[in-house]
Amino acid sequence: MKMRKTIDPFFWLTLVCSSVVVAFILIPLIQMTAQPSFQDLKEALQDRDVRRSIWLSIYTSGLAAFISVAIGTPFAYLLARKKFPGKKIVESIVDLPIMIPHPVIGIAILGLAGKNHWIGNLMQQIGIHIMGTVTGIVAVLTFVGLPFYVNTVKAGFEAVPVRLENVSRSLGASAAGTLLRVTFPLAWRSMLAGLIMCCARAISEFGAVVIVAYHPMIAPVMIYERFTAHGLKYSQPVAVWLILVCLVLFLLLRIFSLPKDNQT
Amino acid sequence: MIEIETLRIELPGFALQDIELSIQDEEFFTLLGPTGAGKTLVLEAIAGIVPITSGRIRVKGRDITDLPPEQRGIGIVYQDYALFPHLSVLENITYGLRYHKTDSHSSGQWVKWLMERLGLHPLARRSIYHLSGGEKQRVALARALAVNPSVLLLDEPLSALDPNFREEIRDVLKKLHQEVGITFLMVTHDFAEVLFLGQRTAILNRGIIEQVGPVSEVFQRPATPFAAEFVGMKNVFPAVFKETRAMVDDLELHLQDPPESHKRYVAIRAEDIVIEKEKLSGNGLNVFQGKVLEVIDRGLYHEVSVSAGKIIFRAILTKSALFEIKLREGKEVHIAIRSSAIHVF
């Protein structure tokens, strides 16, 4: 006798919703990627300004990600391991850059770095300029990317049982030695994932950068400029190249951070 | 020797209160208590993992209270093994060697001996993901002992194991302790483990030590109602004493000796209460008539509750004894308790 399969309406609901979400993301991107001709793409890539802007996007985002690793890792460890008064407030502060409209971030940083503020004055005296500089772009990208790194790595540290660290200390390793020999080797995938998230967020940033540094032009600003000055057709090839470069970079990083089978 | 003086740890909603312990060199000491009593906290305070509020801890005369964990020379083994998952068995065991300045030949020999003793040589290159629970615990033991600590702390090392492995590791612990000459301090909630392994024990309840002493003494002469119940005395009653008599509510129990004036309780082991159909008689025997309230099947034995006057006694019977006297709920029976089986505290 054949068993009749029951159809769960909830299963169909999830299937339909999932299809809508995937289509909603993919269709505009595929449409845009397919729009420019091969000739358009070739010409865009031959344009020195385009190459420079894409490189600047990658370079500044990478730099922002590495700054986040350097200052965000100890901070994420502190949040993952220690209890202290006001911890919830500190965690909320970390999330602020995710919530604030991005032009506001640009304006805030510019306000701080201007001549009217003592910090801005001090920075200019030691030769750090924010307005219209690569330093400015990196500062803004670090600001928007840092929360993604800190939150991802914090979750990674929390997943490492504190007892492993206790045992390491009892065996003679210092706190720093334990971090290097136990915590980092077990949390490095989270650190890499955090780095990717931070980099991805930074490379897609437009609103804050356009306030702080219209020039030198990062790729999103150049796409915007070409769109407003020359229209959709002229901006699309640059956008396609940016998408492709990002895709390759993130795929590579994802492949390196995939867990080994025997460790699952 | 480990000396703990007025150790106090205050946490939100819990406090370890003025813990005083003295543990001899090469002793197998057990800290016994229910879940939430603060046993692991005592262990982690000795290891330097949790900050203490006040008190001093000395090991072999050296005050280690303010030292970080890595300078205390104290090993710890957790019930969930806490092996480093990114390292092989051998790498786990040799993890701590680089921090201890001994000549590499003797430490190599020591590790080799430990691995041989614990049967770990065939597993040396294995990933810890492919080990059984018993093997993992043996690796954890070897790793902690490899650095030759002055004290080994064991946090319920048998709790997470299957019954087969539990017996195996229990035997391993006993033999290792006899061979390595290191002080073992084990926390557990299982008195059977204490009976098998411990030389002396302390009973901890809600952050307070209720009793410290040789295991046999704590087993036979518990000092508080909690200790009595924890070591398996199922019948603990407040009593009023007069010469060699103890009044437990409306029952009069005859004791072997007159108790000291500060005694307040009597305790009787369930296995020391005899249940019979006919009235027993004899010298030094307390005999009461009672009614069976409940018979609970505990697998290998039955637990029987019998009311006598206003008191409910709990006794245990083997399956065959139960069938022999045809015991069932509501049946009238006689219970007999030897005077010498009544513990007074």
Image (cartoon, rainbow, N blue to C red):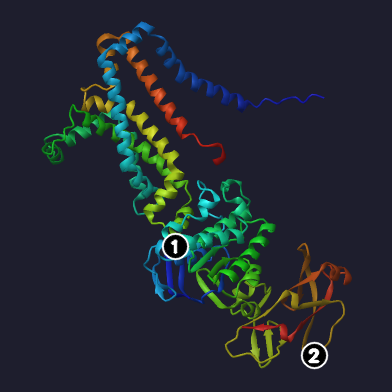
How many marks do you count on the picture?
Answer: 2
CB under 8 Å between callouts 1 and 2?
A: no
* Dot 1 amino acid type: Asp
Please, what secondary structure does the residue beneath circle 1 have?
loop
The residue that disc 2 covers is B283
* Dot 2 amino acid type: Asn
Mark 2: give few (<14), some (14-19) or many (20+) Cα within 10 Å.
Answer: few
Position in image of residue B89 (x %, y %) = 55, 51
Position in image of residue B27 (x %, y %) = 55, 74
**Res. B32 in view:** no
Q: Nearer the viewer, residue A245 or B102?
A: B102
Position in image of residue B254 (x %, y %) = 72, 88
Position in image of residue A49 (x %, y %) = 25, 16
Horizontal placement of B336 versus B143: left or right? Answer: right
Q: Is residue A56 above or below residue A236?
A: below
Question: Would you identify the image quadrant in which residue A166 lies?
Answer: bottom left
Question: Mark 2 belongs to which subunit?
Answer: B
Q: Residue at x 69, y 73 (%)?
A: B234
The mark found on residue B103 in the picture is 1
Q: Are marks 1 and 2 on the same chain?
A: yes
Disc with the residue nearer the chain's start (1 vs 2):
1
Q: Residue at x 65, y 70 (%)?
A: B196
Q: Is residue A33 above or below residue A167?
A: above
Question: Would you identify the image quadrant in which residue A38 lies?
Answer: top left
Mark 1: give few (<14), some (14-19) or many (20+) Cα within 10 Å.
Answer: few
